[in-house]
């Protein structure tokens, strides 16, 4: 009876990916995360136009990431039980008002309130967007998550471009143009919401089938242990990414005698190649297994990360490109691995893993900044190069085959 129910549910969804939906939701992810990229890109502008201190700028970044990270699992938990297809355009509408406030804000507190609106929009978008990718995936869940997640990483990589082309010539008011970006995302997400709404009943049946298989106590302990290990792996990746994204430009300026503009090339290279790695990771996971890709992404990048603080400017940019591709290849894969580890909790697991990445990045930015003030920039960069070595914890994760056996 149980197998018959599973077969009936699986036949409800096409085995082939719905690429039109995947590309639209991936594009919306790019638009959403490019809105978030505007905020750190505006820091030099806000420092000049409103006279903000570095502490206030740090608080803005912390608020954005913490609102996103804390709310994502909560949104995912609620929508797992009560799917809300139109939450997606509603969330981006919140971000649109946030961008409008950011362009017109006369003081720090209005900036902070605007950032909260943008953070809330992002918190709603990420778990629900991941659910749409799951529903449109067919049998290619890794590929589907890669298409979805690569949009987000590409949006984040646009920060240096946004700074150079929009905010430097137009100043704070230049953020007004990004309300059009948000409006475009809302338009696309209305189409996505209609597609999603038409499949709510099928999705509910799918959850019912998955709930029919209840893990025993030993499985429950193994699942909890695996989630804890996964959290440590996300921690190591997120802190290393935060260190490079936020502080490597200062390291390049100090050690290679570069201008601010030239130092941004290093950050853009790391982030852009990270987006490439995010896309490649999903298909590789579909072919070689999710646990294998997670292990490779950290262990293979570890020696390169250890070498990075000790090379010249040319080799450094090459290493950053390779590290970006390898390290971020597990970004979408960890989401799919968590979703398969706890079936029926698609939004919760997406919110937990992606939200955790945001939260860890926020905490890491503050902690690493304090560490730099305490021991210096170069010693901190050498210390963070050890983080990918935590990838050896991946051996504690159950294999893909083992997880399939649990729910067979």
Image (cartoon, rainbow, N blue to C red):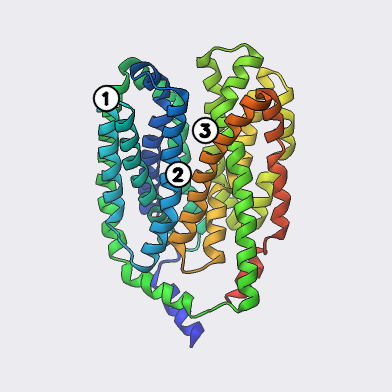
Q: CA distance from mark 3 to mark 2?
A: 24 Å
Answer above or below: position of 234 versus 56: below
Location of residue 182 in the rendering, given as x and y in whole percent from the top left corner: 29, 39
Residue 66 is marked as: 2
Q: Residue furthest bottom?
A: 1
At x 32%, y 32%, the residue is 109
Q: Secondary structure at mark 2?
A: helix
Dot 2 surroundings within 10 Å: few (below 14), some, or many (20 or more)? many
Nearer-N-terminus badge (3/2) = 2
Nearer-N-terminus badge (3/1) = 1
Position of residue 278 in the picture relative to residue 197 (left or right): right
**Quarter of the figure with residue 48:** top left
Cβ atoms under marks 3 and 1 closer than 8 Å: no
Position of residue 28 in the picture relative to residue 57 (left or right): left
* Of 304 and 65, the residue lying toward us: 65
Give the residue at mark 3.
Answer: 272
At x 71%, y 33%, the residue is 383
Location of residue 74 in the rendering, given as x and y in whole percent from the top left corner: 41, 58
Give the residue at mark 1.
Answer: 106
At x 64%, y 70%, the residue is 221
Nearer-N-terminus badge (1/2) = 2
Q: Secondary structure at mark 3?
A: helix
Location of residue 148 in the rendering, given as x and y in whole percent from the top left corner: 44, 48
């Amino acid at each position: 009876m149980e197998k018959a129910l599973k077969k009936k549910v699986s036949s409800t969804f096409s085995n082939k990916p719905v690429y039109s939906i995947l590309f639209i939701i991936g594009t919306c992810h790019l638009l959403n995360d490019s809105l978030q990229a505007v905020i750190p890109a505006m820091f030099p502008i806000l420092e000049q136009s409103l006279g903000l201190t570095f502490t206030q700028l740090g608080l803005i970044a912390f608020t954005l990431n913490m609102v996103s990270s804390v709310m994502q699992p909560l949104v995912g938990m609620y929508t797992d039980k009560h799917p809300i297809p139109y939450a997606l355009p509603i969330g981006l509408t919140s971000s649109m008002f946030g961008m409008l406030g950011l362009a017109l804000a006369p003081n720090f507190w209005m900036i902070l309130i605007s950032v909260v609106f943008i953070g809330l929009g992002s918190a709603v978008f990420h778990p629900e967007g991941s659910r749409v990718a799951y529903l449109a995936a067919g049998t290619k869940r890794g590929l589907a998550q890669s298409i979805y997640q690569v949009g987000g990483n590409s949006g984040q990589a646009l920060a240096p471009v946004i700074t150079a082309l929009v905010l430097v010539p137009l100043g704070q008011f230049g953020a007004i143009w990004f309300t059009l970006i948000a409006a475009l995302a809302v338009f696309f997400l209305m189409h996505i919401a209609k597609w999603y709404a038409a499949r709510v009943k099928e999705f509910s049946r799918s959850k019912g089938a998955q709930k029919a298989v209840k893990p025993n106590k030993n499985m429950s302990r193994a699942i909890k242990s695996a989630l804890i290990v996964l959290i440590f792996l996300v921690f190591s990746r997120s802190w290393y990414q935060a260190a490079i994204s936020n502080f490597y430009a200062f390291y390049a300026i100090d050690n290679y005698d570069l201008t601010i503009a030239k130092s941004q090339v290093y950050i853009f290279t790391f982030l852009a190649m990270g987006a490439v790695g995010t896309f490649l990771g999903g298909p590789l996971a579909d072919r070689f297994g999710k646990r294998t890709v997670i292990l490779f992404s950290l262990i293979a990048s570890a020696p390169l990360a250890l070498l990075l603080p000790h090379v010249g400017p040319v080799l450094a940019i090459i290493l950053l490109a390779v590290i970006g591709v390898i390290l971020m290849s597990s970004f979408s894969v960890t989401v799919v691995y968590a979703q398969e580890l706890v079936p029926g909790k698609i939004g919760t697991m997406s919110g937990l893993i992606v939200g955790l990445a945001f939260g860890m990045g926020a905490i890491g930015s503050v902690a690493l900044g304090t560490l730099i003030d305490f021991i210096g920039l170069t010693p901190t960069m050498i210390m963070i190069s050890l983080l990918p070595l935590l990838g050896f914890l991946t051996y504690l994760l159950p294999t893909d085959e083992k997880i399939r056996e649990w729910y067979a």
